[in-house]
Image: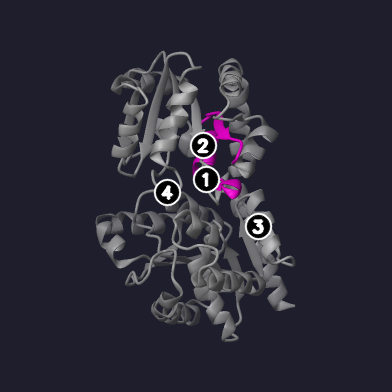
């Protein structure tokens, strides 16, 4: 079996989630005999910013047994793409996809997110046959609202509504990350064939012995603290001011609290808001561009996974959720994150808080401290049994097999 995996307007050379969510996942799938070619169309400017990591990433892919082809494209329009930029994007991508389809004869084209699906769907409109998986990752229209790129009444939004419905209809299989996204997809296209596969994690990458953990905490000067960790980006989805206020709210009910932030984003705004909340420099540490999350995340005592009331919030489940659980960190989530909060409560792997209710926060933080060992064990179990890259790979393999069998029948 051969699979062509499309990634558009994201840069595989950049550090961050694509290593685990694309490369490690593809490598795991490839162990079952699937020949995977990843075709990446990063924006030209982002590609050149990360050019220094090109050789290392290519070598990593070679070790994983996957083929990586990177073709930079001109960044016409934004990742939340206006209608006028669509033809220019398709002109830059579709011929290459067609070329590599002819060269490698993939049984399945696996499109990550909406822009990749747009290109694959265009080939479908040309009556070119292949198994088509639309891996939506996040709700594109709601992301555009969150970024203030459009309003529901705008022409661009209404046009993308039609594209989205058409992509759901034409795809042989739609993959979603959360229960909220599953409901979203079925609402857009009631007959859609949906599979829920969460963001994956290689739990072995976050294994740390008690001795290593004690030494790491001692080196950071946090041996006796209750350490809340935030891992991830800082920006429109994860607003620095909201994150700072969330930590300031929960810290009041934790023994010797400490905030450890691991990010690839510029942290200046977060630091400023923490200071404005009265959190001194001795109570937090920001580690920018951490080299090995697997050695840092397990040093904490809980993972912060909170969002304000954004259009995407009910459907959101971030990669950090799997990373936290694999690190043995109970998750602190907000109740407005319906998909995330549902998992936390169902599997008792953390606490769900209402940041606007101090009594609720106090009760949940006391529960977190009191039951941390039990919550930690449940988090590790969830990582192994739900977020595991091996389990996620098997789910994708099942979809691939079904599409190939249907094509042959």
Q: Earlier in the sequence, mark 4 or mark 1?
A: 4
Image coordinates of residue 303 in percent, x first then y, are: 49, 31
Residue 262 or residue 276, whichever sits in front: 276
Q: Read off the magenta span.
A: 313-336
Q: Earlier in the sequence, mark 3 or mark 2?
A: 3
Q: Marks 1 and 3, Cα distance to the nearest angstrom?
A: 17 Å
- Badge 2, how many Cα within 10 Å: few under 14, some, many 20+? many
Q: Marks 1 and 2, Cα distance to the nearest angstrom?
A: 8 Å
Q: Earlier in the sequence, mark 4 or mark 2?
A: 4
Residue with the mark numbered 3: 184
Q: Earlier in the sequence, mark 4 or mark 3?
A: 3
Residue with the mark numbered 1: 318
Assign the C terminus to one quadrant of the image: bottom right
Specify the quadrant of the image occupied by residue 54: bottom left
Residue 37 or residue 113, whichever sits in front: 113
Q: Are marks 1 and 3 in contact (CB under 8 Å)?
A: no
Q: Marks 4 and 1, Cα distance to the nearest angstrom?
A: 14 Å
Q: Secondary structure at mark 2?
A: strand
Residue with the mark numbered 4: 236
Q: Residue at x 60, y 20 (%)?
A: 359
Whether residue 31 is situated above or below residue 167 in the rendered picture: above
- Badge 3, how many Cα within 10 Å: few under 14, some, many 20+? some
User: Does residue 325 show up magenta in the picture?
Assistant: yes
User: Does residue 363 show up magenta in the picture?
Assistant: no
Q: Marks 4 and 3, Cα distance to the nearest angstrom?
A: 21 Å
Image coordinates of residue 19 in percent, x first then y, are: 43, 51
- Badge 4, how many Cα within 10 Å: few under 14, some, many 20+? few
């Amino acid at each position: 079996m051969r699979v062509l995996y499309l990634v558009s307007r994201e840069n595989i050379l950049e550090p961050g989630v694509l290593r685990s969510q694309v490369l490690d996942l593809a490598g795991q799938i490839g162990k079952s005999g699937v020949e995977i070619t990843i075709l990446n169309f990063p924006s030209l400017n982002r590609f050149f910013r990360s050019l220094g990591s090109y050789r290392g990433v290519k070598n990593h892919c070679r070790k994983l047994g996957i083929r990586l082809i990177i073709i930079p494209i001109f960044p016409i329009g934004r990742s939340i793409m206006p209608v006028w930029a669509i033809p220019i994007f398709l002109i830059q991508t579709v011929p290459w996809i067609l070329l590599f389809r002819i060269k490698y004869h993939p049984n399945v084209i696996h499109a990550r997110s909406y822009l990749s699906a747009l290109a694959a769907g265009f080939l479908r409109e040309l009556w070119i046959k292949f198994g088509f998986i639309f891996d939506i990752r996040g709700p594109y229209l709601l992301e555009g609202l969150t970024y203030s790129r459009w309003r529901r009444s705008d022409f661009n939004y209404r046009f993308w509504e039609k594209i989205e419905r058409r992509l759901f209809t034409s795809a042989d299989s739609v993959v979603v990350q959360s229960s909220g996204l599953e409901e979203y997809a079925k609402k857009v296209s009631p007959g859609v064939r949906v599979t829920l596969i969460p963001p994956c994690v290689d739990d072995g990458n976050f294994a740390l012995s008690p001795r290593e953990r004690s030494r790491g905490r001692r080196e950071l000067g946090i041996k006796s603290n209750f350490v809340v960790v935030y891992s991830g980006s800082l920006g429109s989805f994860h607003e620095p001011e909201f994150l700072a206020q969330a930590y300031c709210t929960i810290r009041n009910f934790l023994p010797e609290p400490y905030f450890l932030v691991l990010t690839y984003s510029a942290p200046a705004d977060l630091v400023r808001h923490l200071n404005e909340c009265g959190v001194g420099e001795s109570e937090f540490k920001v580690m920018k561009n951490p080299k090995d999350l697997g050695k840092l995340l397990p040093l904490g005592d809980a993972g912060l996974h909170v969002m304000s009331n954004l259009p995407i919030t009910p459907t959101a489940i971030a990669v950090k959720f799997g990373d936290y659980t694999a690190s043995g960190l109970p998750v602190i989530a907000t109740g407005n994150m319906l998909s995330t909060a549902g998992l936390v409560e169902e599997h008792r792997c953390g606490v769900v808080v209402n940041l606007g209710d101090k009594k609720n926060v106090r009760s949940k933080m006391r529960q977190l401290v009191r039951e941390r060992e039990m919550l930690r064990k449940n988090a590790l179990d969830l990582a192994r049994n739900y977020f595991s890259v091996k389990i996620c790979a098997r789910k994708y393999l099942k979809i691939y097999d079904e599409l190939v069998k249907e094509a042959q029948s």
